Image (tube, helix red, strand yellow):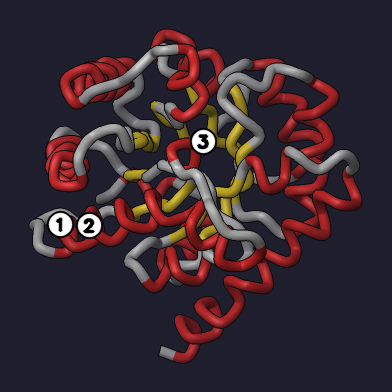
């Protein structure tokens, strides 16, 4: 039995249908006002999962205002248990993007150690781990397989911060998403050939233009952060979330028909 079966039925279904939509408020975003805005928007906009900073008070706040299942992100496993007690259903190591500008980098050995430490602390909680995009693509795929072998339940990609789009408009949005899309396809192929299949979430640098590409490339869902967080009011956030939800609709319908 996979730990994913412990999640609420609608959330399980979104993974199975390959239409999961996770809204990310930010691993280092401890601002209650902004977290409240993003959480409310996630609930009204139709997100399946809300990913917030690992803080028990924020978990309680986000649960109350969103009604959406909560995932907490951190690179400090010792912080996870209290957040789980507060109501978080999923714990995630990463996303690492916010650390790179500060000169803090994560490599395979450290990520594996963090995953092992987290699993030892919380053996019955769904564990998601981000694969650092600073690794070559083949190393990203190998790390994903090693994480799965060590009991990780979800794999997530990243890469948006390393991309420097040179074109405006739609082409620029595709250029922005290229690193995480490449990682998604590479890791998805590796998982498909492995014995244990786990869902893959494509995150970082995505938009309503590129979420369909992520699903077509092998992802079971997408994570969207900056495209929502950068907006200056709740109504704009809700509109953005609904647009992304709409972009995922064809995959939900296709899965229902199968």
Residue 10 seen anywhere in this rendered image of the structure? no
How many other residues sit within 10 Å of disc 2, few (<14), some (14-19) or many (≥20)? some
Q: Is residue 203 visible?
A: yes
> What whole-number distance in Å separates the C-alpha atoms at marks 3 and 1?
27 Å
Q: Which quadrant would the C terminus be assigned to in this image?
A: bottom left
Q: CA distance from mark 2 to mark 1?
A: 6 Å
Circle 2: element type: helix
> Circle 2 sits on which residue?
186
Vertically, is 213 above or below 194? below
Q: Nearer the viewer, mark 3 or mark 1?
A: 1
Question: Which element is circle 3 on?
Answer: loop
| Residue 239 drawn at (x, y percent) | 82, 59
3 and 1 marks in contact (CB < 8 Å): no
Disc marking residue 190: 1
Please state if 101 lies on the left or on the right of 60 as rendered: left
Instruction: Identify the residue at horizontal 62%, vertical 42% (top origin).
Output: 225
Q: Which residue is mark 3?
A: 89
Please tell me whether mark 3 or mark 2 is closer to you in this view: 2
Front residue of 168 and 160:
168
Disc 3 or 1, which lies upstream in sequence? 3
Alpha carbon distance from label 3 to label 2: 28 Å
Instruction: State the residue in front, 112 or 7.
Output: 112
Q: Are dots 2 and 1 in contact, CB under 8 Å?
A: yes
What's the mark number on residue 60?
none
- Residue 251 higher or lower than 72, as above or below: below
Whichever of labels 3 and 2 marks the residue nearer the N terminus, that label is 3
Q: Residue 85 appears in which quarter of the rendering? A: top right
């Amino acid at each position: 039995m996979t730990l994913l079966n412990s999640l609420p039925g609608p959330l399980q279904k979104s993974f199975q249908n390959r239409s999961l939509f996770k809204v990310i408020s930010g691993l280092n975003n401890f601002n209650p006002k902004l977290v409240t805005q993003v959480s409310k928007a996630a609930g009204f906009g139709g997100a399946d999962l809300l990913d917030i900073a690992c803080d028990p008070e924020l978990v309680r706040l986000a649960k109350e205002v969103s009604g959406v299942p909560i995932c907490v992100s951190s690179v400090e496993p010792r912080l996870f248990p209290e957040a789980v007690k507060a109501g978080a259903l999923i714990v995630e190591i990463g996303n690492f993007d916010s650390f790179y500008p500060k000169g803090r980098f994560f490599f395979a050995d450290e990520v594996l150690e963090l995953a092992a430490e987290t699993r030892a602390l919380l053996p019955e909680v769904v564990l998601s781990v981000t694969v650092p995009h600073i690794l070559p693509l083949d190393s990203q795929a190998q790390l994903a397989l090693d994480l799965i072998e060590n009991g990780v339940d979800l794999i997530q990609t990243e890469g948006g911060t390393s991309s420097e789009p040179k074109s405006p408009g739609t082409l620029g949005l595709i250029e922005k998403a290229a690193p995480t899309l490449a990682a998604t396809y590479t890791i998805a192929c590796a998982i498909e050939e492995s014995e244990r299949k786990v869902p893959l979430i494509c995150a970082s640098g995505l938009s309503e233009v590129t979420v369909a590409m992520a699903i077509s490339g092998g992802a079971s869902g997408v994570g969207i952060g900056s495209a929502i967080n950068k907006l200056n009011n709740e109504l704009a956030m809700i509109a953005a979330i609904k647009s992304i939800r709409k972009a995922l609709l064809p995959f939900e319908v296709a899965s229902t028909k199968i």
